[in-house]
Amino acid sequence: MKLFLLFLIGVINLETFEANAQAINICTNPAAQQVLLGTYDPAGYHATTIINDPATISTGINSGVSPDSLHAYLNVLRTFGTRNTSSDTTSATRGIGAARRWVYTKFQQISAQNDNRLLPSYLQFDTTICGITQHRNIFAVLPGMDTSDKSVVIIEGHIDSRCADVCDTASIAQGIEDNGSGTALVIELARVMSRYSFNHTIVFLVTTGEEQGLYGGQAFAVFAQANGVKIKAVLNNDVIGGIICGHTSSPPSCPGYEDIDSTHVRLFSYGGFNSFHKGLSRFIKLEYKEMIQPFASVPMTINIMTPEDRTGRGGDHIPFRQLGYPAMRFTAENEDGDADVTSPTYTDRQHTSGDSIGIDVDHDGVIDTFYVDFDYLSRNTVINGNAASMIAVGPQTPDFTLTATTGYLVVTITAHPEYLNYRVGVRTTTNDWDSVYTFTGSLTDAIPVPTGNYIVSVASVDSNGIESLFSEELTTNVVNDEVALVSQPAKSVELLQNKPNPADEATMISVMVSEQVNYKDAYISIRDVNGKEVKRSPITLNKGVNEMIYDHGYNMSGTFIYTLIIDGKSIQSKRMVFTN
């Protein structure tokens, strides 16, 4: 999305949500809607052969996702010429109407091969986009076996494509990387996962209207909120199959023109301390590391990014997050373009007719150089499917208390004590856990750690060894001698080390307030090593952890000093490092 579009979304999103809440959002399949609401008999959707063992599901997804299938889907998606949100809806071969009917038909075919358990539907919503007032998301619902917890898991990607003008329906806009790749991923996971049975319902969602303002994602999020649909997690996939860096790329992103990266993927999510969105990203990475990576022929590196999206950009996970649902975004490590198509020097493919499946180098009528790496897209599809499956079969998330004694973190489970095992995620300086500990046969565990500030969350582990999503985060300080523990003066306001550090283009700066302070003005001053102030950002000092994202910019590096200033007085300073 262009920067001005994302800014506009931020300015008007509350008004838009209010308008959409009163608009007509219709689920065209009543059976699918009942499953979304959890008001159905699970026995009516049981598979002939129930396969619900987590290890079997994980192995099956890893072996079942096919690069050839993904290639085949993309070959069809490019034939529609354009999938612009406002393009033709009546043609059988061109435009968004033909494309969405093809996806719907694919869901029907997949359902027919799996006891008719997968329920295809449209979500029809009314809002004016480029003069067109009615639009349709496509989705398919795989009913869960347990309605005691009615929350659903969503895997999504947007189908609409675009060129420079967001309302241009005449130009060719195959949109293969952005976002045929995400659409193909969703269809492939519907195909592979529909043979398995999950406790939670899984929704395979293909949205439209993303390029004009995240309208399709917003419509589904508003529909869910208005109808009481409980959402456990949203995994959004957007620009997820390309491996080539363009002349430009929205930061944080690739290092330079024609850099190739097929072994890294970025996970974007909102917030820092106690963000369930960041927690979801950490869970996805943990499940891959423990269940898929040991068997992967090409191991992937998952990078949990600091910001919610690339600088000045946005995706369909944002409307879900804005309504309180845990949501995150998968994006390829490298992108061909920053979408600044109005720049006279822009030569990249993103948001142009050049976003195609590839080129015919030797002019023999056969495409022989591909812009999407189907093996890379396949690996990212597996990461999605494995994480969504474990969320859909895993146990309940517990609550806990956290205290510190000399040299130890003390964790006590206070809710959902029925499980024999629990896991403790501990982090200090990054978006990821430093360590994940497991304890057994007790509701309390003491974890030895060095002196420092710690951020901790916990998860339940079921009899199959699958953990729940992790809990809220709590923080505490550990010291390592009795004298320090007794005599250390309490700090009502403490500037914490930025996370991550070293950082790329962005990092999170936090202030811990243990006792409410009275002040008129507080801000963070950031200076270079020569003392020149490069940024001044206000910060609110409420009791607890107070955070701000500092976005240093694309391809920048160096050491900087950041200082907490309260009512004109320097309170504390720390050093941070950017490496890019």
Image (cartoon, rainbow, N blue to C red):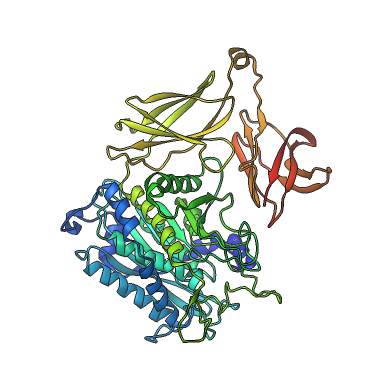
Q: Residue at x 80, y 37 (%)?
A: 568
Q: 69 above or below 509?
A: below
Question: Is 144 on the left or on the right of 406, as rendered?
Answer: left
The furthest residue to the left: 48
Q: 167 above or below 5?
A: below
- The quarter of the picture where the N terminus appears is bottom right
Q: Position of residue 131 (x, y in %)?
A: 52, 80
Q: Position of residue 135 (x, y in %)?
A: 43, 74
Q: 109 above or below 410?
A: below
Total marks placed: 0
Which is more toward the observer, 373 or 138?
373
The furthest residue to the top: 483
Q: Residue at x 53, y 20 (%)?
A: 407
Q: Position of residue 332 (x, y in %)?
A: 52, 61
Which is more toward the observer, 136 or 116?
116
* Residue 219 in view, yes or no: no
Which is more toward the observer, 290 or 167?
290
Q: 306 above or below 219?
A: above
Q: Quadrant of residue 119?
A: bottom left
Q: Quadrant of residue 381?
A: bottom left
* Residue 560 in view, yes or no: yes
Question: Is 294 on the left or on the right of 481, as rendered?
Answer: left
Question: Is 318 on the left or on the right of 452, as rendered?
Answer: left
Which is more toward the observer, 526 or 363?
363
Q: Position of residue 78 (x, y in %)?
A: 45, 79
